[in-house]
Image (spheres, rainbow, N blue to C red):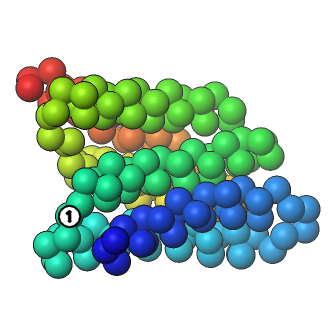
C-alpha cells in the first residue's frame, strides 16, 4: 500500500461523506466545498507521488480514475437533485463516464494498457472542479463552467475512443 494508493482510498471514502454532507439541511456549503476540493487535491497528489516515487501500481491505475469519476458524478448528481444544474447534464456526464468505464473494462479483459488521462481530459476535470465548487458555495453563474466542463469531457471521451479504435 503506497502513499498514492492511500490518497486514492481517501478520495473514495470522501464520496459518501460528500453526499452525506450535501444532503444535510443547513450545512455550511463551505464545508461541503472543502471536502470536494480535498478530493481534487488528492487527485493531483496521488498521481504525482506515484510517478515521482516509481510506485505506480495496478490498484492505483484502476482505482484512481474510478475515484475521480465517482466523486464528480456524486457532486453533479447532488447539484442536479437540488435543481442547481439540469438533470440531463448529470445524465449526459454519467453516460460518458459509463462508456469510459466499459471501455476500460474491455482493455482489462484484453490485457491492453489502460490509456492515461489526456490533456483535454485534465482540462475537463479542472473546469468541472472549478464550476462545481463555485456552484456549491453559491455562485450560480458557475453552471456555465460546468456546461463547458461536461462538453470538454465529452470531447476527451471521443479522443479516448479514437485512440482505442486505432489500437
Q: How many marks?
A: 1
* Quarter of the picture holding the N terminus: bottom left
Is residue 136 found left or right of 58 in the rendered image? right
Is residue 144 found left or right of 41 in the rendered image? right
User: To which residue does mark 1 refer?
Assistant: 56
Residue 132 visible in the displayed image: no
Residue at 23% across, 60% down: 57
Q: In this view, does 82 lie above or below 130?
A: above
* Quarter of the picture holding the C terminus: top left
Residue at 59% across, 30% down: 91
Along the line of sight, the residue nearer the viewer: 139 or 20: 20
Q: Is residue 145 above or below residue 96?
A: below
Along the line of sight, the residue nearer the viewer: 55 or 154: 55
Q: Is mark 1 on a helix, strand or loop?
A: loop
Residue at 41% across, 59% down: 126
Residue at 32% across, 55% down: 59
| Quarter of the figure with residue 14 | bottom right
Give the x, y percent position of residue 99.
40, 27
Is residue 85 found left or right of 25 in the rendered image? left
Is residue 151 found left or right of 159 in the rendered image? right
Give the x, y percent position of residue 16.
67, 57
Along the line of sight, the residue nearer the viewer: 155 or 102: 102
Give the x, y percent position of residue 65.
37, 50
Amino acid at each position: 500500500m503506497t502513499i498514492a494508493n492511500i490518497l486514492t482510498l481517501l478520495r473514495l471514502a470522501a464520496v459518501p461523506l460528500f453526499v452525506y454532507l450535501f444532503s444535510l439541511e443547513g450545512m455550511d456549503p463551505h464545508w461541503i466545498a472543502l471536502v470536494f476540493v480535498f478530493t481534487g487535491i488528492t487527485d493531483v497528489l496521488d498521481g504525482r507521488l506515484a510517478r515521482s516515487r516509481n510506485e505506480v501500481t495496478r490498484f492505483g491505475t484502476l482505482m484512481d480514475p474510478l475515484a475521480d469519476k465517482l466523486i464528480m458524478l456524486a457532486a453533479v448528481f447532488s447539484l442536479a437533485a437540488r435543481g442547481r444544474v439540469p438533470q440531463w447534464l448529470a445524465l449526459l456526464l454519467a453516460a460518458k463516464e459509463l462508456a469510459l468505464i466499459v471501455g476500460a473494462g474491455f482493455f482489462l479483459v484484453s490485457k491492453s494498457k489502460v490509456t492515461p488521462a489526456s490533456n483535454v481530459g485534465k482540462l475537463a476535470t479542472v473546469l468541472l472542479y472549478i464550476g462545481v465548487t463555485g456552484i456549491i458555495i453559491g455562485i450560480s453563474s458557475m453552471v456555465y463552467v460546468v456546461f463547458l466542463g461536461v462538453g470538454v469531457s465529452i470531447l476527451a471521451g471521443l479522443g479516448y475512443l479514437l485512440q482505442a479504435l486505432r489500437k
